[in-house]
Each structure stands twice: as structure tokens, then as C-alpha cells.
Amino acid sequence: MRILFLCHAFNSLSQRLYSELAARGHRLSVEYDIADTVAEEAVALFRPELIIAPYLRRAIPESIWRQHCCLIVHPGIVGDRGPSALDWAIQDGEQTWGVTVLQATGELDGGPVWAAETFPLRRAKKSSLYRHEVSEAATRVVIRAVERFAAGGFVPTPVDDADPAVRGRVRPLMRQADRAIDWQHDETARILARLDAADGFPGVADELFGESWTLFDGWPEDTLRAGKPGDVIAWRETAILRATVDGALWIGHLRRRDAVDSLKLPATQVLAEQLATIPEAPLDSYFPSAGRTWQDIHYEEAGRVGFLHFDFYNGAMSTRQCRRLQAAYRWAQQRPVRVLVLMGGRDYWSNGIHLVSIEAAESPADESWANINAIDDLAEAIITSADQITVSALQGNCGAGGCFLARAADLVWARAGVLLNPHYRNMGNLYGSEYWTYLLPARVGVDGAQAIMRDRLPMNAAAGVAAGFVDACLASDAQAFRIDVARRAAELAAAPDFTARLQAKRAQRLADEAAQPLASYRAAELAEMQRNFYGFDPSYHVARFHFVHKTPNSWTPRHLAIHRDLGWSVPP
């Protein structure tokens, strides 16, 4: 079928549904919800058989839903209505939640139901739930709804608010007054629930050192406790530790509330002056702490397999984070293991260089240059590893340079629900580095590499395997994926041909180096990147500014809105 996506932005859920439906042979086009007239024009141009709204912030125009079947993907249980569905569920401590696909009508979130599914609500940040449980459930219910529509004859079920079996209800937009923290009375669990419910957007308004901030990225702490509730009692790397009435918790990121166009930045970066008299609480080992604490890099070992975890906020990797991860990687290489698995984080493996930190730098061009060189150094360390078989295990999404950093390992195993965006051009025609000109053609061929870079479309794990970019697509359930990774890695380490495989890896690296030195790939890539950072064309700097400041979309990119391609028309 021809299916039009109407969405506020092409976010992770929109991309997941796009890739899943495209894999099933549907012809898809996307239009950003900029104005009623823009959406109406998209419908007229594409003449869709079905319209899906995976992520909207306002109602579909009546002129569209009256004439076309429009399916809304709502991250709530049947009967739930309102724009803060997941926020209320997390903050209220719901045990189960769900996703509902309903038909657009004149009543917001009140249309008849095409498909719905519930799931246990894990105690986690909103963004994590959205990228795992919500994404998985939404994929299943949308596919079910599309199949029902295609088959014809299905009658969606109206929601009876009087039915006692319907738990959902109308709830308003959650405001900062609903999220407020009382540090003198609220226990740690209650504060974390508020931070989790506001994670990503909009954060929790609060006061720190006499200034107004928005708080993000909360983490529990089990061992460090001291000071009056609300006080900052310690710091570590990017996070600060605040005392509560019954313990303490970490806060990783802050945004100034009283500054125009303020950015969400690491807490220790924006509070550097205030933290001068606050003690540091460094970790003395890469091995996990005995109790829960915030640790963005940690290492585990099972037999002859090492697992290096790095959980960086939103998958962005600053210059310092790249250097720290490279040091951890070099340390892990000295451990008595045969296989080294790079686990990334639960929600992201890596999204490449840290665009927000770059934007906040005194010289964004200089910081871009430092950051790309730091991540290149890390990629080189992985590529040239000679004593272990390396595996990138993608639990979470991966984008831009993060995709090629992952591909620097010998093997890439991806969770079935993961999305890959292995391209750079959306960031102002950025050329990219991380040795992609060496790594990508070797996996997918020259033509395949050009297509990936040109098309700029999301790729799910199965498509990654089909293209040759990914070596294996494993279970979609996060826990099952980690179990499968551990099993496969152990089998690899114990395999009778392990030594021969390692020798073949070394021989291939020597042959590649003889054919074209690794340094020459990097030099050519960085020559292009230097033009991006310092040249006369400011496209990268403009695109980065709009990205980090979340400037509202004014148009839909042509590679998504295929109905707007010049000379293209839909056959009647």
C-alpha cells in the first residue's frame, strides 16, 4: 500500500515503524506536521491508501481524517487520553502500560481502537521505555492494524469509558507544578520517578546554588550519603550527587531556565565554578561497584570473554569521553580474555561526536576537530587490536559516526529492535570520518556504500544483515539479547579454530595495510572534515545549531517526502 506518515519529527519510533513497514513492501512517504495546508498538500500529492501518525503534537486536520483513514499511535493504554501519557504512568507508578492504535476523529485520542497491547512498566527513564517497551509494542500493534486495514472488513472498537475494564482516562498535559520536587520531604524513589517521567523532555524545574535549572538524567546511589536534603555533596565526571531525606541520587545534565537558547549540558560542566569546594567521588576500578551508583564506563568478565559497557547520555561522545573510553579499552585489552565485547549502553551504542558540547564550546570548529580526532583514535585502537576477537553488541540505537565505530570491531551483533543511521549528510553535508571509507565498502561494496550515504534512511538490524553491514540480528528482548551475546561470545572464545581465526585477522590487517595504509584513509577523511569545520561553507555549523536547539521544522527533507520529488507522481 501507499502509506503516508504524518509526524512532528522523524523520531526513533517513526523510523522504526518506517523501516518495518518498508521491509513488508509498502511504499512510504513522510510529511512533517508543519501546517494544515502542508499536510493537505502532501495527501493530495501522494494519494495515500492509509495515513499513520507515529508521533504528533497536535490533532490531524478534519479535512484529512474525514476523507482518509488516519491511525494514531498513542503511547498509552486503551482509554488513556492526553499528551503526557507516559509521563503520568511513570510518575504515578503504574505497574503495566501499553500502546494503542486508534483512528483519528474529532475527539483527541478518543477514536475507535484498531489494535492495542500492554506490557509490564519497567522502572526506568521515559526515553528508555520509549525506545524499548513502547517501540516494541508499537511495532507489533501498528503491523497488526495495517494488516487489518489491508484485509478489509475490520471494524475498530469504540472505547466505552463506562466499561470498568477500561483503565485509561483523560489526563491533562503534565506541567512543572505536577513534577515539582520537595527535597525536604520527598524520598529518593519519588524524586527519581519525577526525573524519569521528565527525562529527555521537558526535565524538572528546580533550584541549585541560588539559580534556576531544569534537571535531567537521574540515577540512584546506594553508598554515598551525607549532607542536608537538596545539597550537592559530591561529583564524578559529568554528574553531581544530591542528598535526599533517605539517601542521595545523581543528576547528570542541567539546562539553565533563565537563559535564552540554553543547552542541556553535563552538570559538572555548567557548575564547574560552584563545584570547586565540593569533593570529587572518583571510582577506583572499571569493575562495577558493589552497590548502585552512576558509572558511565564499566567492565565485566566471564571466563575468557570481557564486556566493556559505556553508557553515554543520548549516545553522544565528547572528546573527553572518547579519551576515557579509549583508556578503558586499552586496559581491557590487557585482561586475560580472548573475546572483547563492546556493549555500549542499553538505549544507545553510540551516536558519534557530541554536537551539544561542540555547540557550547568557545570555538565549535576547534572542538569539532578535537572530537573527531578523539573518536578516530578510538576507532583505530579497535581496528588494530591484534590479540582478541572484538564484537560490537548493539543493545541500543546507533547513528552517524557511532555506526562506523561499531563496525571497527571484527563482528557486529545487533538487537532486532535496534535502528542504524550509518550516514552523515543530514548534518549539513558532513563528510564523516571514523575510517568509514575503509570499513564500509569492505562490508557492503562500493555501490552499497554510496547508496547508504546517499539515501540517508534508517536501517533496522535485519536490513543491516541483508546489506552486509551487520553480522547477526539477535533477539529483540533486551535481556534475551544480552544472554545470547554472552553465549555466542563464550562459544567464540572456546572454538577449536580460535587461534586460526585470530591469525587470519592479523594477516588480513597486514594485507590491508600493505594495500593502503590506515593513516591514508584517515588523512583523506579529515581533509574533508577540515573543510566542513573551517571552510567557507557553513552548512555543518548551521545544521548543528538547529539540531541542538531543536528548531521547529520548516520543511520535510526530500529523501523522506518522496511525494515532493520533482517530476514524481503517483499512478492512479
Image (cartoon, helix red, strand yellow):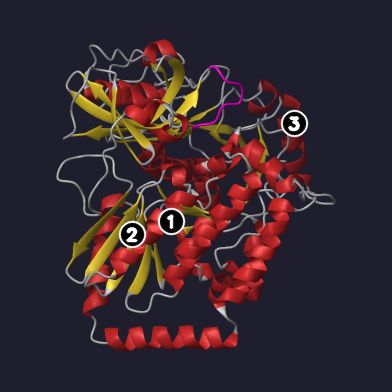
Give residue 54's position: percent from left, percent from top. Answer: 53, 36
Residue 385 painted magenta: no
| In the foreground, 155 or 571 | 571
Badges 1 and 3: C-beta atoms under 8 Å apart?
A: no
Q: Does residue 553 appear left or right of residue 397 in this picture?
A: right
Q: Is residue 293 left or right of residue 13?
A: left
Q: In the image, residue 548 lies at what x, y percent?
A: 59, 37
Image mark count: 3
Q: Which is more N-terminal, label 3 or label 1? A: 3
Pinpoint residue 273: horizontal percent, then vertical percent.
43, 28
Mark 2 is on which residue type? Ala
Check the image and report above or below for 467 versus 316: below
Is residue 262 found inside the magenta-colored segment of the image? Answer: yes
Q: Quadrant of residue 219?
A: top left
| Residue sticking out furthest to the front | 277
Label 2 or label 1, whichever comes before in sequence order: 1
Q: What kind of element bears circle 2?
A: helix
Say what amino acid the circle numbered 3 marks. Val
Amino acid marked by disc 1:
Arg
The stretch of residues the image draws in magenta is 258-264
Q: Which mark is residue 323?
A: 1
Residue 106's image quarter?
Answer: top right
Q: What residue is rendered at 25% in x and 54% in y?
A: 286
Q: Which residue is mark 3?
A: 38
The answer to whether residue 253 is above or below residue 88 is: below
Does residue 425 appear in this view?
A: yes
- Which residue, given by chain and number where applicable, does mark 2 sit on? 328
What residue do we see at 49% from left, 48% from top?
318
Q: CA distance from mark 1 to mark 3?
A: 46 Å
Q: Is residue 253 above or below residue 141?
A: above
**Mark 3, secondary structure of its residue:** helix
Is residue 65 positioned above or below 352 on the image? above
